[in-house]
Image (spheres, helix red, strand yellow):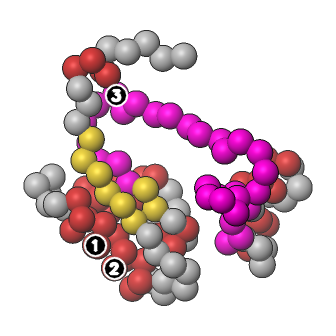
Amino acid sequence: WVQEQVDLGALSLAEAERHPYAHAITRWLGEDAPGGAPRVTSFTPPSSGRLVLCSDGLWNYAPTTERVAALVRAHPATTAPVDVARALTRVALAAGGRDNVTVVVVDIVPTHASMHQEGP
């Protein structure tokens, strides 16, 4: 909901984030999803690293990519992705964790072929 309001120019990001509907979900996948085709985005990482997918339950307490990256880098590269995800979840819960906290961490190792693909 927040991003939709900002994209429409209806509210500033700060206003939308403070709004009572700030955590409303307006689109999802599944049989009961609203009409229209799902919006899908593809991304091919250019190099090895860790991919973090999270809900606003973490993002509310680490609201920049720099902050999330710093939290991830606080763990040695040998730390299992699930342990990094648990640590990020603990950060959100320790900060107040009022919303659900969902965190997925995946190690990315691009194949030789994907590193040389041409983009659209």
Secondary structure category for the residue under label 1:
helix
Q: Residue at the spot x=77%, y=65% of the render?
A: 16
Magenta stretch prevailing secondary structure? loop
Q: Quadrant of the C terminus?
A: top right
Few, some or many residues within 10 Å of mark 3 (<14, 14–19, 20+): some
Farthest residue, direction front: 31
Instruction: Say if mark 1 contacts mark 2, CB within 8 Å.
Output: yes
Label at residue 90: 2
Instruction: Say if mark 2 contacts mark 3, CB within 8 Å.
Output: no
Q: Looking at the image, tell me whether mark 3 or mark 1 is earlier in sequence order.
A: 3
Q: Quadrant of the N terminus?
A: bottom right
Q: Give the magenta-colored segment's residue range.
A: 23-52
Measure the alpha-carbon separation of dots 3 and 1.
26 Å
Q: Residue at the spot x=37%, y=15% of the render?
A: 117
Which amino acid type is marked by label 1?
Ala
Measure the alpha-carbon separation of dots 1 and 2.
5 Å
Label at residue 46: 3
Residue 111, x across and y down, in percent: 23, 26
Which amino acid type is marked by label 3?
Pro
Few, some or many residues within 10 Å of mark 2 (<14, 14–19, 20+): some
Label at residue 57: none
Which residue is denoted by mark 1 in the rendering? Answer: 87
